Image: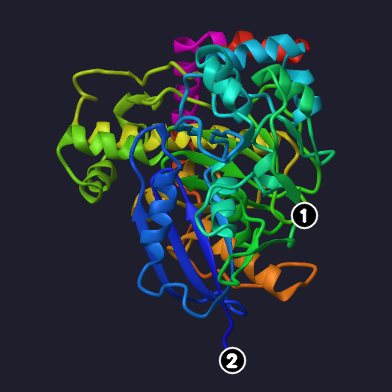
Amino acid sequence: MTRLVAGVDSSTQSTKVVVCDAATGEVVRQGRAAHPDGTEVDPMRWWDAWCEATRGGLLDGVEAIAVGGQQHGMVATDESGEVVRDALLWNDTRSAPQARALVEELGGPQAWVDSAGSVPTASFTVTKLRWLAEHEPEHAARTARVELPHDWLTGRMLEGGEPVAPAVTDRGEASGTGYYSPASGEYLPDLLRRSLGHMPELPRVLGPGEAAGRTPDGLLVGAGTGDNMAAGLGLGLEPGDVVVSLGTSGTVFARHDRAVADPSGDIAGFADAEGGFLPLVCTLNAARVLVATAQLLGVDLAELAELAGRAEPGSGGLTLLPFLDGERTPNLPTATGTLGGLTRAAMTREGMARAAHEGMLCNLAEGVDRIREAGIEARRVLLIGGASASPLVPQITADLIGLPVVVPVAGEYVALGAARQAAWVLDGGEAPPTWSVRHDVTREPDGSAAHAHAEVRERYTELLRTRHPELGEVAAGAQAL
């Protein structure tokens, strides 16, 4: 008899739910509902989306479920479990000054990676709590509990939608807060007090494969995890696999058997969902760069790719720094985009379209470089996210990174990873079940154009250095420490 499990992806933009065969991972049905746009939101909108996505009997026959959620978001609740203010999401950059102040107060980047595994940026929960204490002290004083989006949604499921004390989280999700050590597996109360001003209640950290409890209807609930950790679980990462994800944000990550501590701040030293580690580079700007360029040129995404395909590598000399929404890596939260190399010859629709693709992917290629420099093996790139469906993006990715690129068959890999965790919990085994992942596209680097693509990377690096010389000063300071 087929046993069913479900996985949830509660992301920035929507809630996706997949129901899978627990033995094979085959998706048998799925649901979806949108979230409000913006960088802060009432968490009840996530619960509303969950209810909408699962209506109509979507979970009939399901025995276990787990949640993968957007990382870092700050959900502050009071003693009764009521939300104190709208949640601040990972892509809200208002706490950038607080991030800088916290790094300085603790003694610099090295002190942070020694304690928490990462140098906090505006994305991290610890910086958002400092912002709350400084700008909304009345809300900070009311904050008795702090949760992340996946923690909050899991707790609601366990209590049938009622507000509850933060129940559980996992080490992958906790490792993105800035007040948890992925190396030791412990919270860091001194850092949390330094941020918020007092010590709130925190979720209990469950181990890999450990159950969180059951819903009032008897559904077994897994610990859940962060979205990137869930995606890694859904992809079944092997040594040498590096994931490049092109969604709202861009991420580069790989599984590793040791904690990675990067004082430059480029690599976040996260934990994964299987007991190991998930060093990760994150950018704020990915697929939306293509969307914005398509709107500027008055075309859809397919036409944008067609235009870009007509241009030669290098876009006629155009180079785009794609920091349209500020940037997390490199750490430039107030930056704007820069288009360099403008000439009358280069100012064509084709050149603009190609520059958008190359600029977005150069920033992610820099992330792959950082992963390799940390001693992590990179044999191939697994390309996922909405922009991976472009007919042009996989080849440009292979050319700029210099590695084979594999595009898995389109799927909701965060939700699939959460479902795989649910199957793990249901089975009670020591490791998650083996689910196969089919591949749709494979691209090899174009050796005949290697020189042209090397020039694209060099121009990007030079424009970045010229436009943002402060990055060199930060890097020099981190190296000195």
Question: Residue 50 in the image: x percent, y percent?
Answer: 43, 57
Mark positioned earlier in the residue sequence (2 or 1): 2
Question: Which of the image's four quarters has the C terminus?
Answer: top right
Tell me where residue 230 appears, x and y as whole percent: 59, 54
**Which percent across, then down, holds residue 250?**
48, 39
* 113 horizontally vs 159: left or right: right
Principal secondary structure, stretch drawn in magenta: helix
Count all numbered tags in the image, as a single digit.
Answer: 2
Distance CA(mark 2)–CA(mark 1): 29 Å
Q: Residue at x 30, y 28 (%)?
A: 316
Which residue is tagged 2? 1
Q: Is residue 465 magenta?
A: yes
Q: Quadrant of the N terminus?
A: bottom right
Name the amino acid type tagged 2: Met
- In depth, the one of 447 and 74 nearer the eye is 74
Outermost residue on the right side: it is 184
Q: Which residue is mark 1?
A: 207
- The quadrant in which residue 124 appears is top right
Graded by Cα atoms within 10 Å as few (under 14), some (14 to 19) or many (20 or more), the crowding at tag 2 reads: few
- Give percent across and percent down for residue 273: 69, 53
What range of the chain is rendered magenta? 454-470
User: Does residue 91 appear in this view?
Assistant: yes
Depth order, front residue of 350/339: 339
